[in-house]
Amino acid sequence: MRTEKRTRKVTRIVDDEYLLRSKNVLTRVFLLIAILSAAGLVATFFLYERKLGSVIIIAALSITIGTAMFLLWQGKIKSAGLCTVAGVWGVFACLVFMGGGLGNINALFFVSLTVVAGLLLGERVALLVAGAGVAMGFGLAMLEMFGRLPEAYFMGSPLSNWAQLVFALILTTSTLNLALRERSTALSAAQQQLADRIEADKALHASQEQYDKLLATIPDLVVRTDSQGAIQFFNEMVVKVSGYEHADLVGKNMISFIAPRDQEEAFHNTLLMIERPLGPKTYHLLMKSGEERVFEVNGDVLRSEAGEPYSFVYVLRDITERMQMENESKTLRERLYRAEKMEALGTLAGGVAHDLNNILGVMVGYSELLAQKLPTDSNERRHAENILSASLRGAAIIQDLLTLARRGVSVAQVVCLNKVIGDYLQTPEFEALKARFPEVRIAAELDDELLPIKGSPVHLAKAIMNLVTNAAESIGRQGTVTVRTQSRYLDEPVRGYDQIESGDYAVVTVSDTGCGISPADLGQIFEPFYTKKVMGRSGTGLGLAVVWGTVKDHRGYIDARSKEGEGSTITLYFPVTRDAPAQTVTAASPASYKGRGESILVVDDVKEQREVAAGLLTSIGYTVSTVPGGEDAVAHLQKNKADLVLLDMIMAPGIDGMETYRRILEINPVQKAIIVSGFSETEDVRKTLQMGAGVFVRKPYTLEKIGLAVRAELDRTSR
């Protein structure tokens, strides 16, 4: 089969090549006939007696040749050849008929003309001419047999017969020579052309094979459509990735596989692509499963030689996973930035809080000492109590700053969040909130089977209070604030405002029907002093920042969701504990922390703090000595003994509390001590407690608090 096809191809190539060269052959043949005709016209006057008839014959032959030359000039090669053969045949048929029949020498031209026709116009024309010649000969023979042949008009002399014979031989041999030479040249050219085409076919086949392999191995999707967007071609990756079958894709419009929200943009970009390159575009494409995946699409236009677009080619790359990774990376960067910013602000707040704690400690201590020495009903006593109350409120604000600095939670007792919320709903602060917003309904939906957590009830209550207050303020007039609790198990991490790990959680949700939070503000609501309220009128701007710090101190997570005009929901996740709740501690009587004359060394770098501590402890029966730093404490204990050391952790300049206690233990390995600090329990505090110090007391402290701690440490039998 392949051989037959190649043979037909060779024949077609040779014929085409020969047809192109036939014009040269015909031109030369016509020129030869014209020369011979001119020679015959001249010879007529000398060889024929009837010159008029000869002139007419030669004129007819010349008209035939002229017409054929005109057709040849018009590019009608076959028509020119047919005209020539037919004209020459007619002329010589007349010569034979008028020249005495088959005995006339011109009858030879039927043979030579058959050869010329075959060489120039092919086998069919040659057979036709031969048939016409045979028919002509048979007719003349019959006429001559029955004596019906007319009298010979053209009777040639031996010389004229010889000339006509030479003319026929020259015409036949020249045409044969020209035709064979041109045929040979055409065959050689065709063979070369065929060889070139075979090489081109091989190269094309190799190129097509490489192209197919390339399309099969590249991870991208390749699609070609017509000018109307109907899919004409696609590689196998399209089927593999999309899940569609071939029948689902061929002939379908490309736009129909793009997600509706991107279709208008895709159509507009296709129109623009006709005018100029656009570069990569991103669209959501629909898979057969119904899933939407994100693709980066590069397109180009195929144009005709006239510049008209007839097809579009698209290369599609699936970037769904890359987009997810970029979004996750962006979220992680935002969280890291938020955490770093909160850490920096917390560090600043912690430093300020430490200095303010020292000041407030002096105010609390002196106001309490002053109140004890004044009559109960005196104005001075009330002034001292007001100073004490204001100092304690200031201490609460400092506690907010410490919570923000993640240095505020030092209590890790078992807590039931239902009880924390219930206790808050009975506080004067909650009653004041309801009075401020009488049209706001605050509802509690508490899970009776809520699991307990470990933490600080005070800080948790403050966080709940801040959330409820913030929700009520966002409503303003009429609306609802709902506080819900539930136990929840997360079997896999949850990505929200925060990255929430899997595990068991006690969940507190505070939702409101307020004005909501814009997306731009939602990422900043937990930043210190970031507020849309009038600063000083609705708080300090630390409310949600304190919530953030409290949750992080409890190793919890926050999720915040909001929509403008529909309200907000803030959810707190606290890891649960299986420990039993601690027993309720009753308030201690003053006699329980009374001193018995024991000696106490107060070590603090702030003079006012030393004096306050000395005054409080002296007032309850202790003998107190004070020193301004760690080096002085070591020197004092080398010469004197103390039943207990009240040691500040952070002192400057000089050594800190941990190093001071380490040196004291070198002097007296069983020395009892209490650690005090304006910060909450730090790593240095924990290390000092492990070295043997009794308890940690945070500044500012009241007489009861420091008295109970001192009494408990002195009564402890062993370190």
Image (cartoon, grey):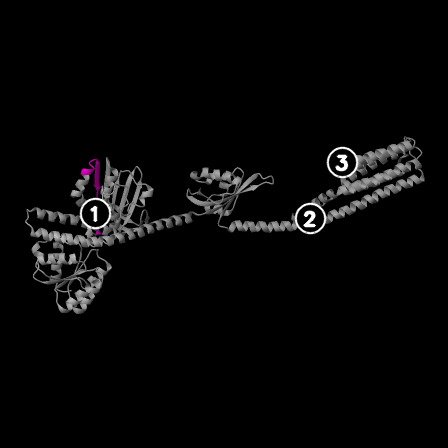
Label 1: state its secondary structure. helix
Say which residue label 3 marks. Answer: 71
| 667 and 110: which is toward the camera | 667
Q: In the picture provided, is 67 more to the left or to the right than 13?
A: right
Label 3: state its secondary structure. helix
The residue positioned 81% from the left and 36% from the top of the image is 65
Task: Name the image quarter holding the C terminus.
Answer: bottom left
Badge nearest the viewer, 3 or 2: 3
Give the residue type at disc 3.
Leu
Residue 409 at least partly seen: no
Label 2: state its secondary structure. helix
Say which residue label 1 marks. Answer: 462
Say which residue label 2 marks. Answer: 193
Gap between marks 2 and 1 measured at Cα: 95 Å
Badge nearest the viewer, 3 or 1: 1
Give the residue type at disc 1.
Lys
User: Magenta stretch containing residue 450, yes or no?
Assistant: yes
Gap between marks 3 and 2 measured at Cα: 29 Å
Start-end of magenta stretch: 435-454
